[in-house]
Amino acid sequence: MHGWIILDKPLGLGSTQGVSAVKRALRDGNYGKCKVGHGGTLDPLATGVLPIAIGEATKLAGRMLDSDKVYDFTIGFGVQTDTLDLEGKVVAESDVRPTLAQVEAVLPRFTGPIEQVPPAYSALKVDGERAYDLARAGEEVVLASRGVTIHGLACLKPLPFRGGVGVGAVPTIHGLGETDTPHPNPSPEGEGLSEVTLTAHVSKGTYIRSLARDIALALGTVGHVTMLRRTKAGPFDLSHAISLDKLAELSNARGLEDKLLPLRAGLDDIPALSLTPDQAGLLRQGRVLIGIAVNDGPYFAMLEDIPVALVEATDREVRVVRGFNL
C-alpha cells in the first residue's frame, strides 16, 4: 500500500486522529503494517480535505505542507475571541455590522502578497515553546508578522429571488476562479451582516483566523471564524475525499485500494521522466545521471509505471531528491 487516502475530516477530529483512523482501517483490513502520515494539519474545529500519506508516499508529505490550500470560511461579526474562533473566550465586542458591499470593497486589500500576524493560539514556537501552550498558561504571546500570499478571495453574493424561488448564488471574485461550493450570504446588499462566508486560495503559512480578524478590523468591527472548511490541499480536493464511515466500510470489505490514489497523485504538477533500466538502477544507488537532455527543474522519475525517485535536473545532470523503495 503506497499512495494517498484523502479524508473529509469531520468536526472535532484532530489531524493525528485522522492518521490513527487510517492506521486502524489498514489494520482491520489486514493490509499489513504501513507508514502513515498526514500532509497538512487541520484544526479540530475545521473540516474538509486531509491528505493521508501511506507507505512511500510519506516521503512526499513534507512537500504537501508547502502546497497552496483553498478554504471556505465564515466570519461572525461583532465578537473577537482570544483563539479567533468559536473555541475561545470573548476579548472584544462591537455593534458595527458591515454591509455586503463594504465587505466586497475591502477584499482587494487582502489579495496578493500581504503581511499577517499569526494567532497567539498557534503551533508556532516562541523560545522553543509552542505559542498555544504559552497562551493557555496565561502568558502574553507576541508573534512577528509574516509574509503570505492570498491568491484569491471570493465573497458569495446571492442572486435575487424570482417568483419566490431562490436561483442560487453568484460569487464576486477577487483573483479566484469560479467556486463550486457556494455559501450564499443571505442579507440584502444594503443591510448589516452578522456573518459572511468567503473562499480563499492561499499560500503555505497562511492563517485563516488571522485573515478573518484583519478583514473584520478593516471593516471597523471585530470578528472570529465560525466555520472553516478546507476544500483543496495541493492537488487534492473534496472530489477525492471520503468520510470516516466510508473508510471503515472500505476497510471491512478490503476495498481501500479503490480509494487509494497513486504516489504520483501528490506530484501532479511535476513532469514525469522516463528511465531506462540502467538509469533506474543508478538512481536507486544514489548515483547522478549525466547528459540527460531535459530542462532544469524537478521530475518524477519512472521506470515504465514504477516510481523510482523525485529528482532534480540541473545542467543536464539528474540527482535524487527522494528515492522510493518500490
Image (cartoon, rainbow, N blue to C red):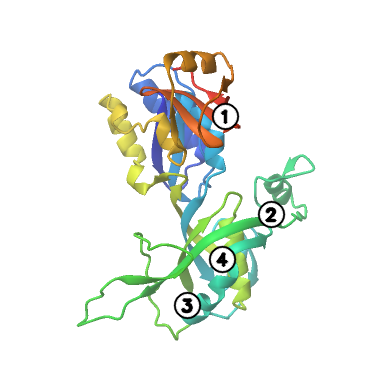
Amino acid type shown at disc 1: Arg
Question: Based on the displayed image, in which of its 4 quarters is residue 3 positioned?
Answer: top left
Circle nearer the N terminus (4, 1): 4
| CA distance for labels 3 and 2 | 27 Å
The residue under label 3 is: 193
Q: Give the crowd class for mark 3: few <14, some 14-19, many >=20 residues within 10 Å.
A: many
Q: Nearer the viewer, mark 4 or mark 2?
A: 4
| CA distance for labels 4 and 1 | 38 Å
| CA distance for labels 4 and 2 | 23 Å
Q: Is residue 115 above or below residue 301?
A: below
| CA distance for labels 1 and 3 | 58 Å
Q: Give the crowd class for mark 4: few <14, some 14-19, many >=20 residues within 10 Å.
A: many
The residue under label 1 is: 316
The residue under label 4 is: 111
Residue 237 placement (x, y as % from top left): 39, 47
Residue 181 appears left or right of 137: left
Labelled disc at residue 120: 2
Element at label 3: loop
Q: Give the crowd class for mark 2: few <14, some 14-19, many >=20 residues within 10 Å.
A: many
| CA distance for labels 2 and 1 | 47 Å
Residue 219 placement (x, y as % from top left): 59, 77
Element at label 4: loop
Residue 318 placement (x, y as % from top left): 56, 26
Can the viewer see residue 313?
Answer: yes
